[in-house]
Image (cartoon, grey):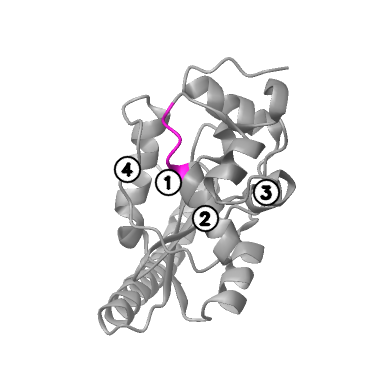
Amino acid sequence: MTPSKSPSTDIRARLARLAEPAAAASALRSRSIARFTERADASGLVDVAYATADSPVGPLLLASTQNGLVRVAYTAEGGEGGVLQQLAARISPRILERPARLDSARRELDEYFAGRRQAFDLAIDWRLTGPFAERVLRSTAAIPFGDCLTYGQIAAAAGSPRGARAAGNALGSNPIPIVIPCHRVLRGGGALGGYTGGVERKRALLAIEGVEPPR
């Protein structure tokens, strides 16, 4: 005599059968969205591609245009929306999540955090910076791994020897931290100074590069 199924087993089986169409529909929607984004990207309809990435200093949002990497943002959980709104307002509302477009950036960041990379080899789109800020950030990008300069030295390198405060403001609004290493710029006398991602992140990045963070 075949033992009868328990009520709980029968309910689980029915729920499983009910879930199958929903799971199939969800998979179909995912494939449709993937095909749509691929076609949009291939047709040149995506002005800004973005992806998220985990890192030892917290979650990151990476964004690129056809010209190169345009944004690296520290984001709290679920905090991507504000960054995307800014990109839509300042560059273009035609933004789509396209992780494949950020593969090189994510790989180089992973290598940096793992201690296998000391310089980034990524095209940069500077459109989110003004002329002076771009000079400051280009000078900052030239600071070697493991070295540090002061705000005054960076200002001088950018052609404004008395512009330490303005250089600090430009560094504070750096749209591409880590890749453009504003964490390598300290106050005169070696004090840590501020940082767009918070001073603890600045300490962590300097520690990755073997620099003893000042107190």
Q: Earlier in the sequence, mark 2 or mark 4?
A: 4
Mark 2 to mark 4 CA distance (whole Å): 27 Å
Mark 1 to mark 4 CA distance (whole Å): 56 Å
Q: Earlier in the sequence, mark 3 or mark 4?
A: 4
Q: Are marks 3 and 4 in contact (CB under 8 Å)?
A: no
Determine the secondary structure under disc 2: helix
Mark 3 to mark 4 CA distance (whole Å): 25 Å
Between disc 1 and disc 2, the foreground one is 2
Q: Are marks 2 and 4 in contact (CB under 8 Å)?
A: no
Between 39 and 131, the one lying in front of the other is 131
Numbered badge on residue 4: 1
**Residue identified by numbered label 4:** 107
Which amino acid, mark 4? Arg
Determine the secondary structure under disc 1: loop
| Residue under the image location 53 percent in, 18 percent down | 211
Q: Earlier in the sequence, mark 1 or mark 3?
A: 1
Between disc 1 and disc 4, the foreground one is 4
Determine the secondary structure under disc 3: helix
**Residue identified by numbered label 2:** 135
Q: Can residue 176 be seen?
A: no
Residues packed near mark 4 inside 10 Å, few (<14), some (14 to 19) or many (20 plus): few
| Residue under the image location 35 percent in, 31 percent down | 118
Say whether residue 90 is left or right of residue 123.
Answer: right
**Residue identified by numbered label 3:** 172
Where residue 212 appears, as percent x and y from the top left, is 58, 14
Mark 1 to mark 3 CA distance (whole Å): 70 Å
Looking at the image, is 159 positioned above or below residue 84? above
Q: Which residues lie in the magenta part?
A: 141-145
Q: Earlier in the sequence, mark 1 or mark 4?
A: 1
Between 142 and 6, the one lying in front of the other is 142
Residues packed near mark 3 inside 10 Å, few (<14), some (14 to 19) or many (20 plus): some
